[in-house]
Amino acid sequence: MKKGSHHTEDSILKNRENHLGKHHSEKTIQKIIRSNKGKIRSEETKKKLKESHLGKKLSVETKVKISKSMNGRHWKLSEETKRKMSKAKSGINHPMYGKHYFKEKNKDLFPIIQIK
C-alpha cells in the first residue's frame, strides 16, 4: 500500500473479521504499559479520556480489587528503613539546618505565634 493511500471498505471489514476475538498476550500488555508510563498528555487528550470514561459503572469486584491494590501500598516501612531515612535527614543534611525562624520577621507567615 502506498504512503498516503487509504483502505477500502472491503479491506477494513476483512481486517476486522480477522482480528475479532484476538487479544494481546500478557507480555505484550506489559510492554504497552511500560511504553505509556509517564507519557505527558495534552489537555485536549485528557478531556477526551475523561469524557470517554464518564458514566461507566465499576463492578463491586473491580472496586474491591482497586481497593486492595491501593491499601497501605507505600507506607509499610521497616524500622531499619525508618532509621536510615531519619539519619539521612538529620544534622547538616536537614533542610532547615542552620536556619532560624524569627518571630517578628515571619509574623505574617505564622499568625498563631504570639510575639512577646
Image (spheres, helix red, strand yellow):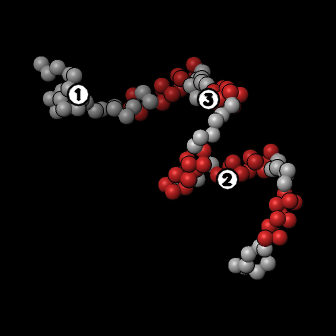
Q: List the residue tagged with mark 2.
A: 35
Q: Amino acid at mark 1?
A: Phe
For residue 82, side relative to residue 60 (left or right):
left
For residue 58, side relative to residue 100 (left or right):
right
Q: Earlier in the sequence, mark 3 or mark 1?
A: 3
Q: At 84% from the left edge and 57% from the top edge, which residue is drawn?
A: 19
Compute the Cα span from label 3 to label 1: 35 Å
Callout 3: few (<14), some (14-19), or many (20+) C-alpha neighbours within 10 Å?
few
Task: Give the farthest residue toward the left.
Answer: 116
Q: List the residue tagged with mark 3.
A: 70
Where residue 21 sits in the image (x, y, percent)?
Answer: 85, 50
Q: List the residue tagged with mark 1.
A: 110
Question: In which quadrant of the rendered image does the N terminus lie?
Answer: bottom right
For residue 110, side relative to residue 44 (left or right):
left
Choose top left, top right, bottom left or bottom right for residue 53: top right
Compute the Cα span from label 1 to label 2: 46 Å
Compute the Cα span from label 2 to label 3: 22 Å
Q: Amino acid at mark 3?
A: Met
Q: Nearer the viewer, residue 116 or 74?
A: 74
Q: Nearer the viewer, residue 43 or 82?
A: 43
Q: Nearer the viewer, residue 56 or 5?
A: 56
Label 3 element class: helix
Q: At 69% from the left edge and 48% from the top edge, which residue is drawn?
A: 33
Q: At 28% from the left edge and 33% from the top edge, which residue is drawn?
A: 99
Label 1 element class: loop
Q: Can residue 47 be seen at all in this image of the molecule? A: yes
Q: At 76% from the left edge and 80% from the top edge, which residue is drawn?
A: 2
